[in-house]
Image (spheres, rainbow, N blue to C red):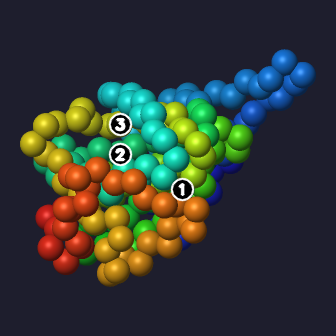
Amino acid sequence: MNIENLSIPDVKLIKPRRFDDDRGFFQQTYHYEQYAEAGISTRFVQDNWSHSSKGVLRGLHYQLKHPQAKLVNVIRGEVFDVAVDIRRGSPTFGKWVGEVLSAENGHQLYVPEGFAHGFCVLSDTVDFMYKCSSFYTPGDEYGLLWNDPNLGIEWPDNCQPIISEKDLVLPQLSEAKFF
């Protein structure tokens, strides 16, 4: 397993080892002791699976009272995955990082608490899996507008967003509630 710090060092790009042969491949997607040894000792309590079509953009979401760290990966298809630092007082507050995650590359993104998270589907469909450190809590749902010019997220050209009505009315960073 190779772990890289991104331009926001608390967000990690994880490249698990993959063992390929003529039958396919094997890849371990999580092993607490190995991740803890690498500095990711988050206790995950919930796994989620999202299936989406090309162009669907989900996010940028977070919970305030019950913040969630996430370990995300794609098991079919490809996404552009984004994390935005919303920790007040952080030197990277309002900054974002983005990575292409796909079933083919097998990469994962670790998104710690204090970040808004979202993704855009680049393939025909995607199956997106993620672990969360806190349970989903109805009523504790917050988010940022995906195209907030103050964030300046550089979504890929082939991301033609299909966005839920709920996500279309999320506030910009200047109007949002955060940590």
The label shown at residue 69 is 2
Residue furthest left in the image: 139
The quadrant in which the N terminus is found is: top right
Identify the residue under disc 1.
80
Q: Earlier in the sequence, mark 3 or mark 1?
A: 1
Amino acid type, mark 3? Cys
Residue furthest top in the image: 23
Please state which of residues 66 and 136 is positioned toward the viewer in this rendering. Answer: 136
Q: Earlier in the sequence, mark 2 or mark 3?
A: 2
Separation of marks 2 and 1 at Cα, in angstroms: 18 Å
Kindly state the secondary structure of the residue where label 1 is placed.
Answer: strand
Residue 145 rendering spot, x and y as whole percentages? 28, 66
Q: Residue at x 54, y 56 (%)?
A: 80
Separation of marks 2 and 3 at Cα, in angstroms: 6 Å
Please state which of residues 4 and 155 is positioned toward the viewer in this rendering. Answer: 155
* Residue 117 relative to residue 36: left or right: left
Residue 131 rendering spot, x and y as whole percentages? 41, 34
Q: Earlier in the sequence, mark 2 or mark 1?
A: 2
The 10 Å Cα crowd at callout 3, few under 14, some 14 to 19, many 20 or more, is many
| Marks 2 & 3, CB-CB < 8 Å contact | yes
Residue 153 rendering spot, x and y as whole percentages? 44, 72
Q: Residue at x 75, y 33 (%)?
A: 18
Identify the residue under disc 3.
132
Amino acid type, mark 2? Ala
Amino acid type, mark 1? Phe
Q: Residue at x 16, y 36 (%)?
A: 137
